[in-house]
Each structure stands twice: as structure tokens, then as C-alpha cells.
Amino acid sequence: MVVLGVFFATSIIVVFLVDLQARHHAALSEARKAALNIAEILAEHTALTFEGIDRTLLEAERIREDNLSGKYATPEAANTALRLLKKASSIVVAVGWTDAAGNLLAHSYDRTPPRSNISDMLHFTAQRDQADGRLFIAPPIPRLSPTNG
């Protein structure tokens, strides 16, 4: 009788451990699927974000070329075109261009820009000093509020 009791207890323990292992593998498989789904969603979102930024930059370049060719009567007219471009994008915070010295020539700000010269900023120096024209993505720049700049 004792042998039967030990066999029965051992069988219960074995069944419990096998079930526990099966649940563990199922949980890992579900977690892997969920992680892959999230990664796919993030990759798609990132691709759409870069496409939106690329379209905005191409349109900003067209506005700059139109400005250089005299299509805009005043610098403010180019700024207005850039403001409309910025408002059409949910991604872009500001867009504009500078001269070679980093002086802001046109911008999409609704008010006076926080800086009139960006020659000391990483995104400007990287583009200025990079001869091969590769894409450079600078670290995020904290937004300036009216109280801090």
C-alpha cells in the first residue's frame, strides 16, 4: 500500500512538472509573438515617420528654391510657406534654413525664433563638416518655452 501511495504521489508530481513546463513554453511562445508584433508595429511607425519627414524636407527644399528664384516677394512670405508646411505635418516641430555661417534665413516659427544663429548646434556642425552628405540625426533638442529661451 505504501508503494502504491509513493507511486501515486510521484505520478502527481511528474504530471504537475510536465504541465508546468508546457505552460512555461506556451508563455514564452506567446511573449515572443507579442514582442514580434510590437516590433513590427514600431518598425512600420518608424518607416512612416521617416517618410513624413522626408516629404516635409523635400517640400522645404522646393520652398527654398522658389525663394532663391524670387517667387516669394519677402522673407516673411517664405516663412509663411514654411509655417503652412509645418502645420501640415504632425511630426515636424520646426523647419527652416540658414546661411553657411548658421544665421537663420527662413523659419516656420509663429513668433521670433528662439535662436537667430545655430552655428554651435550639433545638427548644423555635422552637416557643415560632413563632406559625404550622409544623413545625420542629432539627439533630440529640448523645446524652448517662453520662460527658458
Image: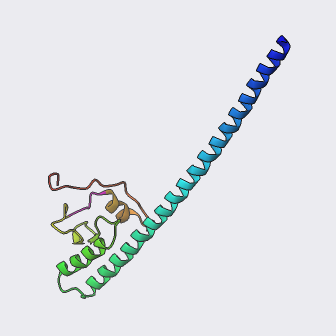
Segment colored magenta: 117-121
* Left or right: residue 141 compared with residue 20: left
Tell me if residue 10 is in the magenta stretch: no
Q: Quadrant of residue 85?
A: bottom left
The answer to whether residue 51 of the structure is visible from this angle is yes
Residue 60 at what x, y percent from top left? Answer: 33, 76
* Left or right: residue 57 compared with residue 33: left
Q: Quadrant of residue 103?
A: bottom left
Locate the N terminus and report the quarter of the image it occupies.
top right
Between 120 and 95, the residue placed more toward the observer is 95
Residue 5 at what x, y percent from top left? Answer: 80, 16
Q: Quadrant of residue 126?
A: bottom left
Residue found at the far front of this picture: 1
Residue at 33% from the left image edge and 66% from the top image edge: 92
Identify whether 48 is placed above or below 147: below
Residue found at the far top of this picture: 2
Between 29 and 14, the residue placed more toward the observer is 14
Identify whether 22 is placed above or below 40: above
* Left or right: residue 110 compared with residue 123: left
